[in-house]
Image (cartoon, helix red, strand yellow):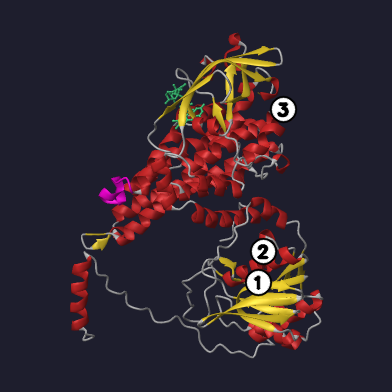
């Protein structure tokens, strides 16, 4: 089995601030982290690898600093890391990103399973995984929360609106993972972090891929961001404190005042 | 800001550790620890799983092969989640003293003891203090005498951390005793003393903090230990014991930084929320100024603590002298407990009457940090070391 897991470095913040003049996200001083969906994808991928044997390759596209999410993935258990980093990859929208990653996966070769996070928490598009599957002509299973490989078949439990469904797909296939609420991410201890340093790690540039330069980075991205703005701040709600009986009484009064009741 | 001190691996380790500790040493667990007056099994296991026992020992003997700077990171992070300081002591005492077995113990003892210690299955403490003497090591009454195939030890030790922990795990203490009685401190020998040996009788004390850890003493009545438990050479104990103290002192300084900065963070949250005379406390300069002072002291202390530990790491690579290490570490251990005590006291003050309630984490931290004014060497002894080096000219020369 050869598994590729795609991971992205994202800003570690729930309080995203926008530069009011440029309309872009303020990234300075914001620490970065592995996209949480991707960490779950990685750990599911590792579970599969541990059962089937074989190797798990972690793949990311990003600036040179994105090496740290690869190192984290290697510390958690991935066997090999590849970072696509080149100015020519920069500014990619989901179309160009999916194209670039699919070209890298082609270059890795003989990949049986691709696992992605459902979406990146900075863009929330959920388009890249399906985009890769389309370009690699692989069947895809989205919104999976558990995957297994049995006899050359991917079996995935998907989260659907009113429950779960289990579907199967012939390998090679791609799955995108959504994080179950009870997932506790692995925190690697020191020796595993040090061992990660000794694992194979490569950085690939445009020249390393058999790709059409016009479909990469900004040139390959038809998406236009017209404007980015933070949603208007909501007024802080009124907090009622005191004994339950008292609060209920006050609440009813307020609701009457507001003509809700 | 780009970090200029820690390696990429240390940075990653701290991040991983912080998240891990938040999940495993929760405020509820800390309360459980205080009530039961012992470290809950679940915390012990979590520490073992994360390689936090005796990690200065190399992987060959089951350790994690930390350098001292990395060991300091663990101290700081434990102090952030455990205001009682119990887990900090449970971590730093075995870490610092098993390292002495690792550095100076016999191969047989290393193979026998270290794999257990590094897995958290055997406690390793330090026993130098006695009822009538602490700082003045040369006046101790405990003696060690060579006999056929080993030694016989007599005397008593007091104010020793980890008595119950050693008893429960068939562990013991790196112990100092007099061998050449005429030579004072220069005739002392260092060795490992299993606390379950025949002839040892223990007693436990109750202390003002660090509820999860036991402290006490023991009588040593004709206790025989094998030759392999010798640490370093006979009568050379005093010359090496400082490396144990100093590892512990450096980590303690990081613990002080972690505890105080965490207390100040809590104070900041409180100052923003709490109103008096129509404004949040944070708006009063009378609150801002002491906050600024304590914050800057603790940030500087934190940097210095890691620097001192790095100097000790460099000493092991032949790039710094013993005396440079001693002095740098003493500076961190002098100010760490004093400044942290003041900072935490301020954090209590900010919180009004709540600051004095048993529930308030800051008063727990205050009681814990106070112990470091004595443990592993008093503040006065730190001043003696610094003065000795400054006056002796072995001090920093401006490079
Ligand atoms: C919580 C706790 C845990 C401890 N755990 C351990 C342990 O695990 N193992 C262990 O061996 N010990 C332990 N100790 C003991 C600690 O190491 C001693 O308290 C310390 O070394 C001082 O010894 P002492 O208490 O006998 O004080 P003394 O040495 O008698 O000193 C009394 C006072 O006089 C000061 N003083 C002494 N000499 C001078 C001088 N020349 N000039 C100026 N002032 C001086 C001291 O600084 C101190 O303030 C622990 C202590 C505490 C509080």
Q: Is residue B394 visible from the viewing direction of this image?
A: no
Answer whether labels 2 and 1 touch (C-beta < 8 Å): yes
* Separation (CA) of disc 2 from disc 3: 39 Å
What is the secondary structure assignment of the residue under circle 3?
loop
- For the C terminus of chain B, the image quarter is top right
Subunit that carries the residue with mark 2: A
Question: Residue B344 location in percent, x, y?
Answer: 38, 45
Residue B106's disc number = 3
Q: Indicate left or right for B135 with B267 as reference.
A: right
Q: Magenta segment range?
A: B349-359
Circles 3 and 1 on the same subunit? no
Magenta stretch: includes residue B216: no
Residue A73's disc number = 2
Question: Residue B70 location in percent, x, y?
Answer: 61, 47
Q: Is residue B289 visible from the viewing direction of this image?
A: yes
Question: Residue A5 location in percent, x, y?
Answer: 69, 72
- For the N terminus of chain B, the image quarter is bottom right
Subunit that carries the residue with mark 3: B
Residue at 68% across / 72% down in the picture?
A: A148
* Separation (CA) of disc 2 from disc 1: 9 Å
Location of residue B366 (image quadrant) = top left
Residue B280's disc number = none
Q: Main secondary structure of the magenta part?
A: helix
What is the secondary structure assignment of the residue under circle 1?
loop
Answer whether labels 2 and 3 touch (C-beta < 8 Å): no
Q: Indicate left or right for A247 with B159 as reference.
A: left
Q: How dense is the environment of label 1, judged by Cα within 10 Å: few (below 14), some, or many (20 and up)?
A: many
Q: Which residue is mark 1?
A: A7
């Amino acid at each position: 089995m050869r598994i590729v897991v795609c991971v992205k470095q994202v800003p570690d913040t729930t309080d995203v601030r926008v530069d009011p003049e440029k309309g872009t996200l303020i990234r300075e001083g914001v620490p970065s982290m592995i996209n949480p969906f991707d960490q779950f994808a990685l750990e599911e991928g590792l579970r599969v690898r541990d059962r089937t044997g074989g190797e798990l390759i972690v793949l990311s596209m990003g600036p040179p600093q994105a090496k740290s999410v690869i190192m984290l993935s290697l510390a958690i258990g991935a066997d090999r890391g590849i970072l696509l980093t080149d100015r020519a990859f920069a500014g990619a929208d989901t179309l160009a990103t999916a194209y670039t990653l699919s070209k890298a996966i082609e270059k890795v070769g003989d990949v049986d399973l691709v696992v992605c996070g459902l979406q990146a928490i900075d863009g929330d598009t959920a388009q890249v995984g399906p985009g890769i599957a389309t370009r690699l002509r692989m069947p895809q299973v989205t919104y999976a929360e558990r995957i297994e490989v049995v006899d050359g078949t991917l079996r995935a439990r998907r989260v659907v609106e009113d429950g779960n469904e289990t579907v199967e797909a012939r390998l090679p296939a791609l799955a995108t993972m959504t994080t179950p609420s009870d997932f506790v991410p692995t925190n690697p201890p020191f020796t595993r972090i040090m061992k990660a340093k000794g694992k194979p790690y490569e950085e690939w540039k445009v020249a390393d891929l058999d790709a059409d330069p016009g479909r990469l980075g900004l040139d390959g991205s038809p998406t236009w961001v017209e404007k980015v703005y933070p949603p208007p701040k909501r007024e802080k709600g009124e907090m009622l404190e005191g004994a339950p009986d008292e609060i209920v009484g006050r609440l009813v009064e307020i609701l009457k005042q507001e003509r809700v009741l | 800001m780009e970090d200029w001190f820690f390696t990429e691996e240390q940075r990653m380790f701290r991040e991983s550790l912080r998240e891990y500790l938040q999940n495993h040493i929760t405020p509820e667990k800390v309360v459980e620890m205080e009530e039961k007056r012992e470290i809950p099994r679940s915390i012990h296991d979590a520490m073992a799983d994360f390689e936090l026992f005796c990690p200065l020992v190399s992987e060959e003997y089951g350790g994690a092969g930390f350098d001292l700077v990395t060991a300091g990171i663990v101290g700081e992070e434990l102090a952030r989640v455990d205001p009682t300081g119990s887990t900090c002591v449970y971590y730093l005492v075995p870490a610092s003293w098993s390292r002495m077995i690792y550095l100076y113990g016999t191969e047989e003892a290393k193979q026998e003891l270290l794999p257990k210690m590094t897995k958290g299955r055997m406690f390793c403490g330090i026993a130098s203090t006695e009822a009538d003497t602490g700082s003045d090591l040369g006046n101790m009454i405990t003696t060690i005498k060579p006999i056929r195939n080993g030694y016989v030890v007599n005397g008593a030790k007091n104010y020793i951390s980890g008595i119950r922990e050693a008893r429960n795990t068939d562990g013991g203490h790196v112990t100092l005793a007099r061998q050449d009685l005429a030579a004072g401190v220069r005739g002392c020998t260092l060795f490992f003393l299993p606390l379950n040996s025949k002839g040892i009788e223990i007693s436990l004390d109750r202390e003002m903090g660090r509820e999860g850890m036991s402290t006490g003493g023991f009588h040593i009545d004709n206790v025989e230990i094998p030759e392999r438990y010798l640490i370093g050479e006979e009568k050379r104990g005093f010359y090496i014991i400082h490396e144990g103290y100093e590892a512990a002192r450096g980590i303690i300084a990081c613990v002080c930084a972690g505890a105080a900065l965490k207390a100040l963070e809590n104070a900041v949250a409180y100052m923003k929320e709490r109103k008096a005379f129509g404004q949040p406390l944070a708006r009063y300069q009378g609150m801002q100024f002491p906050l600024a002072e304590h914050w800057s002291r603790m940030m500087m202390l934190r940097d210095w603590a890691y620097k001192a530990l790095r100097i000790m790491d460099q000493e092991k690579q032949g790039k710094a002298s013993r005396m440079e290490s001693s002095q740098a570490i003493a500076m961190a251990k002098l100010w760490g407990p004093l400044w942290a005590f003041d900072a935490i006291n301020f954090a209590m003050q900010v919180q009004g009457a709540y600051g004095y309630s048993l529930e308030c984490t800051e008063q727990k931290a205050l009681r814990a940090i106070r112990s470091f004014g004595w443990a592993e060497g008093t503040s006065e002894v730190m001043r003696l070391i610094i003065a000795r080096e400054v006056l002796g000219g072995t001090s920093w020369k401006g490079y």
